[in-house]
């Protein structure tokens, strides 16, 4: 497997576009489309929030009960189409019908996505006009993928994309994706809006298995603010254009696909966590030598979701007490007198701050300098087993409050 420059058009047979539709704002890209002329098998994971947005209901039905093929995804920003009742679901259908008519496909072969403010109904004049613009400017270029990734942003500071290339059955396969998300990020399935395309030929069942497996260790292990969105959607499309023999059983080819999918989802996860609203740095918490993977996941996720720890990281304060506090209320059982805590950053010497129940002598000045880096790694050695897990988050800044205080205006 090798990493390549690309996004949702990296794989064969995919086109994309992004346009200014005026859904909420007049001066920014706010609608995107991804399209494959050849039908795609589809897998997906969706928000665990009971209060699900209309596009989540529309897409999950198609992924679960559809005719097995999808051709297009249409996404808007600005308005989330959440808390909109039966009318919101009808507007999903209207959006899909418009795209279907323009692309000569069935409405149930169109997936939809929305992100933005909860409550208002969609501006359908803008949405339908946007769909028409999108259908008319679809391209298979790298630039088109980047434009689409830019068009799905809300409070993101930059688009998130990733693509890889690998070999299956002697055929070159590509897999690429785009994601958006900056706030209301604390998933328990996947996160925010994420769209991944591939030209691999693989059964729908194995697609779903691989996606569900990798999500557990990637998107489910990030948090910005502890809020699970109403609109979280991750969709995986595969159109078979690579020409490999269909993968219908687990084995070497399946593992190659799963490895590539894991890389892309992990990369996009870290990019989302590091671009949390107002964030200045990515926080990585790596729990090693734990009794079980489940315990390691609970502990690492508890640390990166701690508001006190996140605030300390913003202040470049090596306050290891907040790490232990977050571990202590996580619900996991452990011996606080038998573990080690370290801070790391690229280009810096590792600093140990805690050992067996007590602080370790270290330079506060060196620790402060380390914590100023764009990625800070907290390593917790439980010294009780061989399991490990990693979670990703960001610091908590004044800007986070400012962004969310003004979000609807």
Image: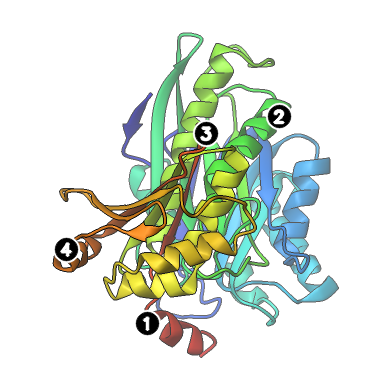
Q: Quadrant of residue 201?
A: top right
Count of marks overlaid on the render: 4
Q: Reading the chain from its start, which is encountered first: label 2 or label 1? A: 2
The reply to whether callout 4 and callout 2 are in contact (CB within 8 Å) is no
Q: Secondary structure at mark 1?
A: helix
Residue at the image position 71 percent from the left and 61 percent from the top: 55
Q: Nearer the viewer, mark 4 or mark 1?
A: 4
Query: Does label 3 or label 4 sit earlier along the sequence?
Result: 4
Whole-angstrom CA distance, mark 3 to mark 4, is: 30 Å
Under circle 4, the secondary element is loop
Crowding at dot 1, Cα within 10 Å, few <14 / some 14-19 / many 20+, comes out as few
Q: CA distance from mark 2 to mark 3?
A: 36 Å
Q: Is residue 332 above or below residue 279?
A: above
- Mark 3: give few (<14), some (14-19) or many (20+) Cα within 10 Å: few
Give the residue at mark 4: 363
Q: Which residue is mark 1?
A: 399
Would you call the spot at circle 4 few (<14 residues within 10 Å), some (14-19), or many (20 or more)?
few
Q: Which is closer to the viewer, label 2 or label 3?
A: 3
Q: CA distance from mark 4 to mark 1?
A: 29 Å
Q: Position of residue 358 (x, y in %)?
A: 36, 59
Residue denoted by label 2:
204
Residue under numbered circle 3: 385
Task: Pick the quarter of the image with the N terminus.
Answer: top left
Would residue 215 be seen by someone viewing this image from the given angle?
no
**On the rendered structure, is 350 left or right of 321?**
left
Circles 3, 1 touching at the beta carbon (< 8 Å) = no
Give the distance between the C-alpha atoms of the residues marked 4 and 2, in whole angstroms. 54 Å
């Amino acid at each position: 497997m090798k990493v390549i420059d690309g996004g949702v058009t990296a794989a064969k047979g995919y086109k994309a576009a992004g346009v200014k539709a005026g859904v909420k704002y007049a001066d920014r890209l706010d609608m995107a489309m991804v399209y494959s002329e050849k039908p795609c098998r589809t897998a997906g994971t969706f928000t665990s929030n009971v209060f699900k947005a209309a596009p989540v209901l529309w897409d999950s039905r198609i992924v679960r009960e559809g005719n097995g093929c999808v051709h297009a995804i249409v996404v808007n920003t600005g308005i989330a189409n959440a808390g909109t009742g039966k009318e919101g679901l009808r507007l999903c259908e209207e959006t899909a019908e418009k795209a279907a008519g323009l692309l000569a496909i069935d409405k149930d072969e169109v997936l939809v996505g929305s992100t933005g403010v909860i409550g208002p109904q969609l501006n359908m004049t803008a949405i339908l006009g946007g769909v028409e613009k999108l259908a008319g400017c679809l391209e298979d270029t790298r630039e088109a993928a980047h434009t689409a990734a830019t068009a799905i942003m809300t409070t993101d500071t930059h688009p998130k994309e990733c693509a890889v290339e690998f070999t299956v059955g002697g055929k070159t396969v590509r897999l690429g994706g785009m994601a958006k998300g900056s706030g209301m990020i604390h998933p328990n399935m996947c996160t925010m809006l994420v769209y991944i395309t591939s030209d691999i030929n693989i059964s729908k069942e194995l697609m779903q298995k691989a996606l569900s497996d990798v999500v557990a260790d990637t998107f489910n292990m990030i948090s910005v603010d502890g809020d699970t969105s109403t609109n979280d959607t991750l969709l995986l499309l595969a159109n078979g254009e690579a020409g490999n023999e269909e993968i219908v059983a687990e084995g070497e080819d399946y593992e190659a696909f799963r490895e590539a999918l894991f890389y892309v989802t992990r990369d996009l996860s870290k990019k989302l966590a590091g671009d949390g609203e107002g964030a200045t740095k990515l926080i990585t918490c790596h729990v090693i030598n734990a009794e079980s993977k489940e315990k390691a996941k609970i502990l690492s996720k508890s640390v990166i979701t701690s508001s006190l720890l996140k605030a300390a990281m913003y202040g470049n304060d090596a306050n290891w007490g907040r790490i232990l506090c977050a571990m202590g209320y996580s619900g996991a059982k452990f011996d606080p007198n038998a573990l080690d805590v370290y801070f790391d950053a690229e280009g810096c010497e590792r600093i140990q701050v805690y050992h067996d129940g007590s602080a370790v002598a270290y330079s506060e000045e060196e620790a402060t300098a380390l914590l100023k880096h764009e990625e800070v790694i907290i390593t917790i050695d439980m010294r009780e087993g061989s399991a490990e897990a990693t979670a990703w988050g960001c610091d908590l800044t004044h800007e986070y409050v400012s962004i969310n205080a003004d979000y609807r205006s």
